[in-house]
Amino acid sequence: MSAEALILAAILTALAGGVITFLFPVHSRRLAGIINLAVTALSFLLVAAAWFGFRHSVEFSLPGFLYLGLSFQLNALTAFFALLFAGAWVAASIYSLQYMEHEDNQRRFYAFLQLTLAGCLGVVLAADLLTLFLFFEMMTFCSWVLVLHQENRDAMEAGNLYLYLGVIGGLVLLMGVFLLYHAAGSVAFAAIPGAVAQNPRLMIAMGICFLIGFGIKAGMVPLHIWLPKAHPVAPTPASALLSGIMIKTGAYGLLRVFYSILAPAANKGLAGAVFGVVFLWLGLLTMLLGAFLALQQRQAKRTLAYSSVSQIGYIIMGLGAALLPAGKDLYGISGMLFHILNHAVFKTTLFMCVGAIYVYTHTLEYDHLGGLGRKYPGVLVPFAVAALGIAGAPGFNGYASKTFLHHALTDLYHYQPSWWLWLAEKLFVVASALTICYFIKLFVNLFLGEKDWSHLPDRMAPALQIPLWLGAATVATIGLFPHRVVRALIIPAMDVLGFDAGALDYVAHINVWNWHDVWGMAITAAVAGVILLLIYKFKIDSLVFPRWLSVEKMVYRPLARGFMWLCLRPGVNADSMVNRLYHGAGDWSMALFRLVTKVDETTDKAYRSAGDLSLALFGLVTKVDQSADMAYRTMGEFFALVCRAAGFVDKGTNSAYVLLGKGTRQACISLDRLDQDLDALYKGLGLVYTRAASKLDLVERKASGPLPKKRPAPDWLKNLQTALAKPAWNISNLNVEAIVVAGALLVVAIILIFYSR
Amino acid sequence: MNSVYNYLPLWATLFPVLATVPLFFVERRSAKIRDVFAQAVTGITLLLVALMYPYVRDHGVIGVSYPGILPPFGISFRADILGFMLALIAAAVWFLATVYSKVYIGHEGGGNRYYPFLLLSLGGCLGVFLTGDFFSLFVFFELMSLASYVLVVHEESDAAIAAGYKYLILTLIGGLALFFGIVIAFEVAGNVDIAPGNLLFAEPNRLSFIAFLAFLVGFGMKMGIFPMHVWLPDAHPVAPSPASALLSGVMLKTGAYGMIRVVYNVYGPELIAAAGWDTILLVLAGITIFLGSAVAIAQTDIKRRLAYSSIGQMGYVLLGIALLTENGLTGTTFHIFSHAMMKSTLFLAAGAIIFKTGTRKIKEMAGIGFKMPVTLGCFTLAALAMIGIPPLNGFISKLILSMGALDAGKPAFVFLLILSSLMNGIYYLPIIISAFFGVKKEERKWSRAFSELKPSMWIPIAVLAASCLVFGLLPINLPLKWAQIAAKALLGAGN
């Protein structure tokens, strides 16, 4: 098998293991845990085989996947992280076997534990930012299920905060990736350096995006607020991995983006100057605030969570020191990488120690604990070793990495003496001293004192203890042989980041076992002592003293509290102010959303009222129309009436005319008859005249001649004959008047006849 | 035009319309045959659309035209890669929704009215994507709008009637505006053909601006662009869930398709940019994105929330159109595909929840994930795709759209996209969280997987949800390839 296949197999094993565990019901509770352990161990072995089997850098891509293609790389740097992550996962998986016995819903827990491993491995093995982002999101979402595992109110609240900040961080990060991709045309780590240096505004914008995106995951102040809530509520194996491993993905991202892309060693430029200062001071702030808040916690896991915040500050401070162009960056980077390794080891160990106690006591409140050292020395010793590691005691691993980081500051001061670097160095010492203080407080509260734990079993389950001892042994081994670790792991990793041979050789020969550095540690311890004196004296008294000294309790405890209040209040305020800021921003945006809703509703209302208005308008127009219609109709009726009247008049006139006509015709007929009569008269006259003439003629003739013998018939007779032949009283000669008169007579006759009876 | 003579676009469009006639006689006999018949019709339609692929791939443009029908415009059918891709999406989602409808509508009743109109609106929708000129497009656009009205008012509740009324009125206004624009274009150019290089307006004068506004109102109304979106959050939730999925998942896209054609085939990107009208589109897109996402947060009804989410997502699509860059256009086209898959999944899943529990209130859905693991699993996948979580398809469209915005020199829109993604997270994640987490122990029993719904309901959901993953992660991303080809072709058309 090639190294490429092994790398993919490592990620896919975890992925497939998670999916299978989730989808296929495993009825035995143990079996899910054993599958998880096997899958995790297999992933670890695959990564180890890929690196140790081939021992050379591999970079390959899967073109076409997710549009731009996915690409992975295996080299000393990524192998360092991947092996660290998978190794811690194996330890936590062993631990889970026993620890998860008392938790519900184991199958889901194991499934998402494996999926989260796949995400973490993908983040560090990615060769480009898009692949990194893919696995980064996967890690966020899968680990979220681990955070809210217990599903009580605290867990849900912490889970929500974790998820939403994770989503916000992811999106801001994505914005940075987009800007970078657009500016450089590629998202591969190898291809980018130098491509984006031209545009300072763009570069600053990108830098801020990456700072926020990775900073949230890393738990950098002021983006850390989710961390102290989410880490304690998760089941302990998950807390250990969250604190020990997952926040390192943020640090890894910051390292790759800022050290490889924005401000590469060869050309740090503006980005180095700006973000170097930013990271240096954010790192210091994170260290101090985290340590300060860890000091005031009264619950073991919360203390450890704040401690993680503080320790990530060291790592970020190292990056900041390396980014600054003034000094040698090799101290910062080597210290950062070394501290990532060391913190992963001791923080997982510490969480698992605390969790082992919790399995039996079911509480981690300081007030309910104490005196467990005698009961469980198997926890006490690993805890003490890891605590010495984190406190930086010489001979334990934290000493070496803190010394490196301290050198980074003193080296900067050496090249560029200024008051703020001097202050930074002093603050570094104070933060380290505070670390010692809160671990003393934690240790004392857990293990010292008198408390009756006789009801608990004496022997601890081996699955709980093995990882603790493994961790403690690693702490001690690294602490005793820091130079070997540096040469074996840190220097090859720095080689990948582009350090030249001289620098690597220099790092290889840094000796932490010198009087100066040990003396520095002693000063830190002395400061811690002073702080202890200042803070703890009253408090320890009030806590350790038995109950019967109630007067002291009544008197000193409020005094100690008052003192603590005076000391810690500024820190609490800062923390809660940041918290409130977040809440305020949330409220504000909700108010804004409500406002937008209102705008939307108003728009909606405007539409509705426009509709109503037009409906009303239509109604009005209809009404006008109707009344016009009615007016017309009335008018029409009126005119019809007028017409009818005119018709009557007309008919009357007509009949008058007809009557007149009839009268005229009658008159004409009468005239005609008169004319005829006249005619006849004339004719008669003519005849008379003719007769007279002929008589005269006759007379003349008589006078002159003989008279005619026969006398003709008289004229009246002739007329009568003519009249008889052609009677004048024809029916057509009857007229209306005659009929009327006749009718009237008839009626009168009828009446007369009727009444005469 | 060098288009290849091919009857497939014609048949794909007319087949579902003609199939309503036998359906009318079949559905009176038996509901069972009716369901099978409707599924068969949509299945064959999907096949007909898919059969176009070899021709479209080899020849670019295929189609037939009948200038004699409805002169002077004529009717023509045409498929290029963009039309084909959208038609394929439409036919596929329609087929799945029809399969899903069997149980859902069987439960709800009124299937005898529902199915014919489902097929009619499929025909209308395909007609919009597969026609070769704006007049034919308009005819099918109206067919789809009116047929889908019946789907909106299906339940005939008071709310449905009111919403349907609003939908109808605004759709009519949009249709009239669109027709107005088409008439102006016809008057100016003498034809309204959709063809590369055939830009209908040559210069930015007052008339062409009026036509532009008319097109914007017409297609923007269908698309749900601010301030024309008011009908959408009323109409989409009241429809039966398969119809909501089609309304939100596919029919909104006809407006987007029209806007793409208007910007790239009617005016051309040069004219739009020279006249500065892209600013109008960008401002509207920005408001739409913000408003849709923000208001969705305030919703308590799951389907209303999804409907507002659709408004925001259509803002993305308009943004991609308005950017006038190749990446923007590719992103838009791919987002049309992505959103069709995501939103159909979400609506069908929401419908399944309402079907099973009878509640639409998000607050009452706590612990639902344990009762319906497959449905809620698909819902979760699609919701994560909406937020833009890799490796799902929503992430890829967001990535390409952002590149388009940066190409255009507008990084503010990248910020807006990111902000909107966050808001998507704010309104989708609580549903998922309360579905799976924070449940009392006794209620936390997993029901036996797959016993939650009938297979004919969960298989369509699962297919759609799986496509969100497959077409995001896997290298064989055909829709993305098509989107790239289509974007190249459209931008080439402007030169």
Image (cartoon, rainbow, N blue to C red):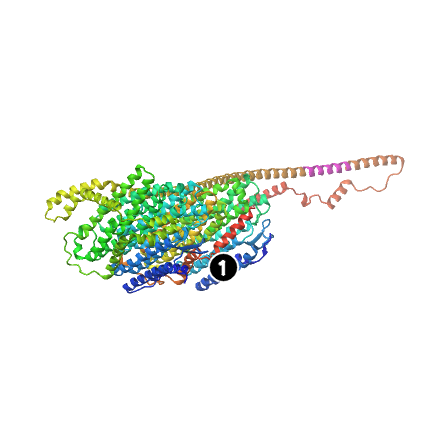
- List x then y, in percent, for residue A164: 33, 49
Chain where mark 1 sits: B
Decide if residue B153 is in sight here: no
Q: Residue at x 67, y 39 (%)?
A: A666
Specify the amino acid type for callout 1: Leu
Q: Is residue A213 left or right of residue B221?
A: left
Q: Is residue A678 found inside the magenta-colored segment of the image?
A: yes
- List x then y, in percent, for residue B15: 52, 59
Q: Residues within 10 Å of mark 1 (few under 14, many from 20)?
A: many
Magenta span dominant secondary structure: helix
Q: Is residue B80 left or right of residue A35?
A: right
- The residue that disc 1 covers is B46
For residue B100, above or below residue A587: below
Magenta-drawn segment: A667-683
For residue A292, above or below residue B84: above
- List x then y, in percent, for residue A726: 73, 45
Would you identify the image quadrant in which residue A410 lies? top left
- List x then y, in percent, for residue A755: 53, 45
Q: Nearer the viewer, residue A73 or A117?
A: A73
Q: Secondary structure at mark 1?
A: helix
